[in-house]
Amino acid sequence: MKIGFIGTGNMGRILIEAFCEAKVSTPSSLFITNRTIQKAYAIKRKYPEIHVCTSSIEVVHQSDFIFLCVKPLDIHPLLKELKTGLQEHQCLISITSPISVEQIESAVPCQVARVIPSITNRAKAGAALLTFGNRCSEHTRNIILSMFEKISKPILIENNITRVASDIISCGPAFFSFLLQKFIEAAEAETDISKEDAVQLANEMMIGIGKLLESGYYTLPTLQEKVHVKGGVTGEGIKVLENELGDMFHHLFQSTHAKFDEDLQKVRHQFDNE
């Protein structure tokens, strides 16, 4: 099985490295390219057996599964470029949320899927969101599921929850790392702890929470219940959070959905004017 990657930016590189280290594929079975080709060669320096292609169409000619790891508004022009080189047995896999599998299927003759990964997949953890096109065979679906089972927990989703699911698994690590940084900065500012010590303690705390949840010992509510002793210090902190968080997360989802709707309109305009 030969796998291609068109686009080796942040998420493209994360998937390539995760695939290599989880043995989803051997480096010699990967064909990659990027608009700035030096980025592709930077990956080849780490995995010398990877094939760097000089064009997107060369990746298509060499691959059975082709990941499109480019920006949403770059997808439609790319599909026009690739269309004549694609065969029915191949599968295009987009990783961008504003473009549906139905839109891509309307523009190409091959099988289509969408996979929205997470940076956590780099550690062979977290979820990946999967949506399959109507032309995607059961055999192809099983191969894609098998790929992502090695680096994530694959979760099938419908179009109507694409944005919120992406907010949680894909954007969530950035949102909560931002909150954790603010937590650390406040600890350093308000007490005698050094930033280095606060970072170490916070990192260990987050890793510990993840392992507790993974083990099934606690859910989020029961974890809070066990730490939150009535009349204790944790309770005082929870009161502050309850008073000051307010509708922050509501506003967060409203903002991400507004940007998503904007992107949807731009993408729809491209496909409708084909």
Image: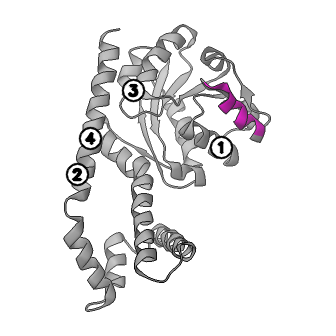
What separation in Å lies between label 2 and label 4 (alpha carbons)?
10 Å
Q: Residue at 62% of width from left, 24% of height from top?
A: 64
Q: Residue at 71% of width from left, 36% of height from top?
A: 42
Sequence-wise first label, 2 or 4: 2
Q: Is residue 152 visible?
A: no
Residue placed under numbered mark 1 in the picture: 17
Question: Which residue type does callout 2 highlight?
Answer: His
Q: Residue at 37% of width from left, 71% of height from top?
A: 219
Quadrant position of the C terminus in the picture: top left
Q: Position of residue 130 (x, y in %)?
A: 43, 39
Question: Which residue type does callout 4 highlight?
Answer: His
Pointer 3: residues within 10 angstroms few (<14), some, or many (20+)?
many
State the residue in front, 119 or 162: 119
Sequence-wise first label, 4 or 1: 1
Q: Secondary structure at mark 2?
A: helix
Pointer 1: residues within 10 angstroms few (<14), some, or many (20+)?
some
The image quarter containing residue 101 is top left
- Disc assigned to residue 257: 4
Q: Secondary structure at mark 1?
A: helix
What separation in Å lies between label 1 and label 2 (alpha carbons)?
34 Å
Question: Which residue type does callout 3 highlight?
Answer: Val
